[in-house]
Image (spheres, helix red, strand yellow):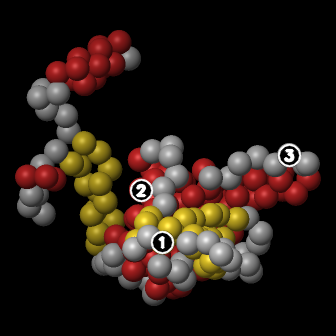
Amino acid sequence: MSKTPKQKDKIFRTISKVKYLKEILRRHKTEYIEILDIVNKYNLTHERGIGFWSLTRIIFPVIETVAFIIGKEKENFLEEDLEVPFGHLVWELYRHALMHSDQLRYAVYKEKTFSWAIHLGNENIGHFVDKYAGSHTTTIHIAIPKLYFDLQKFLIKEITKNDTSLISIQVGVHFSDKRERLINELEELYIKY
């Protein structure tokens, strides 16, 4: 595989699509679903629940990876395969806000405000859009359990296709000496450890 200038410092691993999807599904079951269950159980048994915004933070990179593997735009994958309404807007508001900042975002279009919310419930309670009466605010609600379990169902369905075509997944980065401080830290780690 020839690398573009943007990829020249990246290290890739070649793996079959089905094998990589199985790795994601294993992590999904043993990490992400487990964390969701812990938060749900705690919040059901305690008067003061714990926050669960982090549940969206940990799942969006997985969604992005799965979309890449199946050759689909992440926003379309979110909307079409995971049944999240307004996938492009949701991706912009949720994913970017939660991955790149600690400030929640909303959108304004023609003097109307579009916000978002997440809820726990269970995997049978879906995503929905709600307009507040007498308000210019519309909220897109994402059901975290539904999102998690829909992703799990999708992975299982894709794995049954047994697509053994090879894909390249980035697993590392070569560091050149252009980034002096970073190189100094790597050199120190290399020598001391």
Q: Secondary structure at mark 1?
A: strand
The residue indicated by pointer 3 is 48
Asked if one can make out residue 188 in the rendered structure from this viewpoint, the answer is: yes
- The residues tagged by marks 3 and 1 sit, at their Cα atoms, a distance apart of 34 Å
Asked if one can make out residue 23 in the rendered structure from this viewpoint, the answer is: no
Q: Position of residue 140 (x, y in %)?
A: 58, 72
Q: Which of the marked residues, 3 or 2, is nearer the chain's N terminus? A: 3
Q: Secondary structure at mark 2?
A: helix
The residue indicated by pointer 2 is 96
Quadrant of the image for the C terminus? top left
Quadrant of the image for the N terminus? bottom left
The residue indicated by pointer 1 is 112
Q: Position of residue 108 (x, y in %)?
A: 43, 66
Q: Nearer the viewer, residue 109 or 3?
A: 109
Near mark 3 (Cα within 10 A), the count class, few <14, some 14-19 or many ≥20, is few
Residue drawn at 11 percent across, 29 percent down:
178
Q: Is residue 74 above or below residue 7?
A: below
Residue drawn at 46 percent across, 53 percent down:
97
- The residues tagged by marks 2 and 1 sit, at their Cα atoms, a distance apart of 21 Å
Q: Is residue 62 above or below residue 9?
A: below
Q: Secondary structure at mark 3?
A: loop
Q: Quadrant of residue 96?
A: bottom left
Judged by depth in the image, the label closer to the viewer, 3 or 1, is: 1
Near mark 2 (Cα within 10 A), the count class, few <14, some 14-19 or many ≥20, is some
Q: Which of the marked residues, 3 or 1, is nearer the chain's N terminus? A: 3
In the displayed structure, does residue 143 sit left or right of residue 93? Answer: right
Residue type, numbered disc 3: Arg
Q: Position of residue 164 (x, y in %)?
A: 36, 78
In the displayed structure, does residue 169 sit left or right of residue 127? Answer: left
Residue drawn at 60 percent across, 50 percent down:
54
Q: Nearer the viewer, residue 26 or 118?
A: 118
Q: Quadrant of residue 142?
A: bottom right
